[in-house]
Image (tube, grey):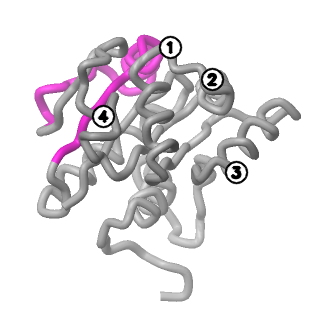
Amino acid sequence: MKKIVLAIGGSSGSIYAKVLMDKLVLLQNQWEAIGVVMSDNARYNWKLEIGDFEEKKYPFNFFAKNDFNAPFASGSAKYDTMIICPSSMGLVGRIANGISDDLTTRAADVILKERRKLIVVPRETPFNLIHLRNMTTLTEAGAIICPACPSFYTQPNTLEEIASTVVDRILDLAGFDIKTKRWND
C-alpha cells in the first residue's frame, strides 16, 4: 500500500492534477494515504481553468502550503512517492537548489534525501537553459522528470482523455497497477 504526496504547483495545467486525483480515487485499494498540498497559484489556476476546487470530493488529506507538521515533512513518515503535477519552472528551480521554503519544497527535499521516488511534471514551455539545468540537477538527484507532453496514438477525443495520456504515465511511474491503452495494444 502506497503513501503518496501530491503537490499541485502553480503552473497552468490543472486538468492534469484533476484527472490524476480522479484516477487515484478509483485506485483506493492500492494506496494507504495521499497527502495533498496546493500552492496559492494552483488554487487560482484551478478556478480559472476548471472551476471551483471541491476538496471534499476527494478522500485525501489536505495540508496548508506552510504546514511543516504534515507527516511527509519528515522522512520518518515513510511516504514512498511524491508527485508534483503540474510543476512550474520556479518550483523546479527551488527544489533543484535546495530551497525548502514551503511544504512542497520541504517534502521534495525529504523524498530526495530518503532516496524515494519524486516524479515532477513540468508544464511550461519552451525550456530555457536554466530550466534544463535545474531538471538535470533533479534527475541527477534521483527525480523523474515527466513533462506534461500528451501522446495521441490513443486517439483521445476530450481534454480529459488527452490529459489521461500523461496521467497514466505518471501512475505507471508511481508503480500503480492500471489499465490503459498502450502502444500497439
- The answer to whether mark 2 and mark 4 are in CB contact below 8 A is no
- The answer to whether mark 1 and mark 3 are in CB contact below 8 A is no
Asked whether, in this view, residue 19 is left or right of residue 101, the answer is: left
Residue displayed at 56% across by 25% down? 11
**Disc 2/disc 1 C-alpha distance (Å):** 8 Å
Q: Which residue is mark 4?
A: 72
Specify the amino acid type for callout 1: Asp
The residue range painted magenta reads: 33-58
* Mark closest to the chain's N terminus, 2 or 1: 2
Q: Which residue is mark 1?
A: 101
The image quarter in which residue 120 lies: top right
Q: Residues within 10 Å of mark 3 (few under 14, many from 20)?
A: few
Residue displayed at 61% across by 37% down? 123
Relative to 77, residue 92 above or below: above
Residue displayed at 65% across by 22% down? 90
> Picture coordinates of residue 165 (x, y %)?
49, 60
Specify the amino acid type for callout 3: Glu
Q: Residues within 10 Å of mark 2 (few under 14, many from 20)?
A: some
Q: Residues within 10 Å of mark 1 (few under 14, many from 20)?
A: few
Q: Which residue is mark 3?
A: 140
Asked whether, in this view, residue 29 is left or right of residue 147, the answer is: left
Q: Is residue 157 visible?
A: no
**Disc 1/disc 4 C-alpha distance (Å):** 15 Å
> Picture coordinates of residue 65 (x, y %)?
36, 15
Q: Secondary structure at mark 1?
A: loop
Q: What's the mark number on residue 94?
A: 2
Closer to the camera: disc 2 or disc 3? 3
